[in-house]
Image: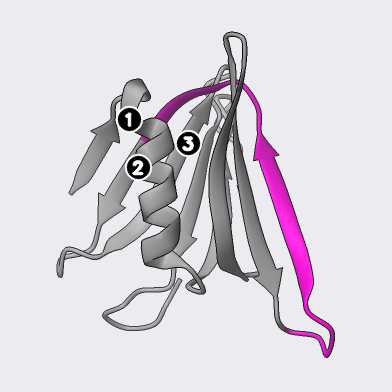
């Protein structure tokens, strides 16, 4: 099941989503309007998702921790000119995928480890 989040609710939703899913492993899949798809090779543990507005421009900033090395590194991704935010749910009702669409109609899908089987 998928749920589209209204723009007026993005900030609160992302703040609450971030708190609920902190430390869950996640990786990006990117779907370009050209049909090209890219899957991120590395997973990261979610640290924080925030929203930033500058005039009519909206950014979503996602911070994840890479814990595969001795020294933890922070990976920060900024999605510019956000036009849509949606969430997909697992069959158990847990949040499985955060979808963010930008002005170029690129869909950035942040897939979380499953609470059912551990896969991401």
Residue 4 visible: yes
Give the residue at the far top of this rendering: 56
Q: Is residue 98 left or right of residue 64?
A: left
Residue at horizontal 62 percent and vertical 70 percent from the top? 43
As displayed, is residue 52 above or below residue 89?
A: above
Q: Is residue 38 left or right of residue 69?
A: left
Residue 41 visible: no
Q: Which residue matches tag 2?
A: 13
Q: Residues within 10 Å of mark 2 (few under 14, many from 20)?
A: some
Q: Residues within 10 Å of mark 1 (few under 14, many from 20)?
A: few
Q: Give the camera-side residue of 59 and 105.
A: 59
Q: Find residue 100 and name its label.
A: 3
Q: In the image, residue 34 lies at what x, y percent?
A: 59, 25
As displayed, is residue 49 above or below residue 90?
A: above
Q: Give the camera-side residue of 109 and 80.
A: 80
Residue at horizontal 35 percent and vertical 74 percent from the top? 114
Report the predominant secondary structure element of the magenta stretch. strand
Q: Is residue 110 left or right of residue 41?
A: left
Q: Secondary structure at mark 2?
A: helix
Q: Which residue matches tag 1?
A: 9
Q: In the image, residue 18 lies at what x, y percent?
A: 45, 56
How far is mark 2 from mark 3, CA to CA?
13 Å
Q: Give the camera-side residue of 40 and 61.
A: 61
Q: Which is more N-terminal, label 3 or label 2?
A: 2
**Residue 62 magenta:** no
Q: Nearer the viewer, mark 2 or mark 3?
A: 2
Q: Secondary structure at mark 3?
A: strand
Where is residue 104, by image quadrant?
top right
Q: For the residues labelled 1 and 2, say whether their Cβ atoms are less than 8 Å apart.
A: yes
Q: Residues within 10 Å of mark 3 (few under 14, many from 20)?
A: many
């Amino acid at each position: 099941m998928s749920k589209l989040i209204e723009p007026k609710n993005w900030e609160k939703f992302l703040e609450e989503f971030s708190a609920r899913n902190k430390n869950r492993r996640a990786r990006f899949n990117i779907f370009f309007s050209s049909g090209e798809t890219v899957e991120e090779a590395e997973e990261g543990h979610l640290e924080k998702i925030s929203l930033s507005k500058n005039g009519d421009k909206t950014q979503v900033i996602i911070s994840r921790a890479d814990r595969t090395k001795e020294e933890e590194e922070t990976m920060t991704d900024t999605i510019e000119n956000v036009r849509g935010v949606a969430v997909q749910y697992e069959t158990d009702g847990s949040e499985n995928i955060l979808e963010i669409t930008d002005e170029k109609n690129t869909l950035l899908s942040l897939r979380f480890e499953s609470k059912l089987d551990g896969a991401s």
